[in-house]
Amino acid sequence: MTDTRIHVKSSPHLISGPATGVLLAVLTVALIAALALGVSVGSVTLPPGQVWSVVWAHLSGHGDRTDPTLGQVVWEIRTPRALLAALAGAGLAVAGVALQALVRNPLADPYVLGVSSAASLGAVLVPALGGTALAGLAGSLGVTGAAFVAAVASALVVYMLAQRSGRLLDSWLVLSGVAVGYLCTAGTTFVQLQLNPTELQGMMFWLMGSVAGASWDDLGVPTLVIVACVAWLLTQARALNALLSGQDAAVAVGVPVAAQRVGLLLVGSLLTATVVSVVGGIGFVGLMIPHGVRFVVGADHRRVLPVSLLAGALFLVLVDLAARTVDRPNELPVGVFTTGFGVPFFLWLLRRRTSGGSDAS
Amino acid sequence: MRLDLAGVSARIDARPIVSEVDLTAEPGEFVALVGPNGSGKSTLLRTVYRSLRPSGGVVRLDGADLWEMRPRQAARHRAVLPQHGQAADGFSVAEVVAVGRHSHRKPLGRETAADREAVTTALRRVGMDWAADRLMTTLSGGERQRVFLARALAQEAPLLVLDEPTNHLDVGSQLLLLDLVRSLGLTLLAALHDLDQAAAYADRVVVLDQGRVVGHGPPLDVLTPAFIEEVFGVRAHVGPHPLTGRPHIAVASLR
């Protein structure tokens, strides 16, 4: 009788079905354009022709015959920076989607499990431990490594607190995440008081989130981890839909709920921990992007996950571009911008949505 | 599909809730599980959902141990209409029903024509095909419950387990739902709290009290006024329904 494809026009979502493919294509093109812009524009704007001859020279494997300073700026500084922004944005957005489904609370974000606060604590501990017995350990981990270890540790602690004979309890997960987060924040504040102003300056920038200082060397491992985590999550779209139907309903349709949720928690936390350890606590992307995406394509994760991936990447590349151009040659922390742009946009979306009455019931 | 619970016991937090329950449902039979609040109905059903592993005994489907099956395999044998249907914001009716197809797909498999057909058929059977592209949040309680039933039907499983499916529905929606499940030709196991509905719709009733089976058989053989007073603590009148002629139970408090 009816083929669902005939109903496309009457879909309750702004964009659905085949149009999602178009949306993904548009976002991909926009992301490539934004990356190109990110490489060309900075504290000094370079002629696009020269920029691309540098990038092409590196990509094609031919020697770089342009001005070495220009080559260094483009290839060693701006290109990894733009790529890191895309990677972090995509990772945070997808982690947000996963963790919101895990705790079945659309207000959750990637930091709900205390991962961000723990990473900050790990980071500030490195200079603070200098000169103590643990200096060697802290030094060998580096700020990034320490942040990562602390973030993973907090996720594991939260997981252990929230599980009871293998089952995760939603409310405990959120409560223990928030509690561990507060504890780490208090720890961070305390440690900051012990630091000298120079150390503090470097830390502040990191605590607020930044993709500045990205280099090819520190892109490798995070890229692998983020790509692997995101790839796995993309295959879990249907299971996420089932989880949102309730625990019993999900078991009934054949989702191994307990194992599925542990998997989501571990992969979501690993993803967040990796992002936070390289770019710091960039707020709001993981909350806002999934919400904005749901507003446009509905809540079905088969669309939400890939669209959030691209939208998150695009958003953070653009925000980073803004952060380093509005007050040239000074740079502002990306986190200030994600929140500064994000909150008004988010509130506008919320108001619009409520007045539209789409969820009146 | 023959459902067979043999000596099933279940605990929650080490506290025994259900003790050594024997229960069978023959292919095509409607078995109603009745009992006072806290008698263990939902807990017993959870051992058939596979959301609570029995601490003793075995749940078999056509002789095969349900708990030995893989999750997807189990889902192709038994579908569930849980007590607390949840409709997350932003899902359309068709998307909710598509969740029922989980066990029919490979992890990376795309939605097939068979999946779309199953979703459409399930919605048509519950009379909700007109709403395929509506948001769940725009439907009434009775309509949502029929959509959740369609999700279970999309599993295409021969056994359907229902936990108090008429809860929170108005009388019209309650009877519509029971007529509907009765007409599906599936093996049905339903926890019902309304004795009158159990008597009118079920082929057999199983009565639980404090986690044990205290009566089982055809409704009129089991649900006598004396038995109802003993288990539920109410006076009961049992007779033919004045409008339908089906078994009818009217209750009143003892005072």
Image: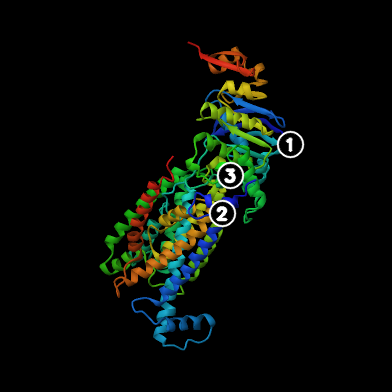
Q: Which residue is mark 1?
A: B63
Asked if marks 1 and 3 fall on the same chain, the answer is yes
Q: Tag 2, which chain?
A: A
Q: Mark 2 belongs to which amino acid? A: Gln
**Mark 3: which amino acid?**
Val
Q: CA distance from mark 3 to mark 2?
A: 17 Å
Give the spatial CA distance, label 1 vs label 3. 29 Å
Tell me the SS state at disc 1: loop
Nearer mark to the viewer, of 1 and 2:
2
- Along the line of sight, the residue nearer the viewer: B245 or B17: B245
Rendered location of residue B131, percent (x, y): 55, 42
Please, which chain is the residue tagged with disc 3 on? B
Q: Vertically, is A90 above or below A165?
A: below
- Quadrant assignment for the N terminus of chain A: top right
Looking at the picture, does residue A345 appear above or below residue B1?
A: below
Asked if both marks, 3 and 2, belong to the same chain, the answer given is no
**Dot 3 corresponds to which residue?**
B97
Residue B9 shows which numbered tag?
none
Q: Is residue B140 left or right of residue A197?
A: right
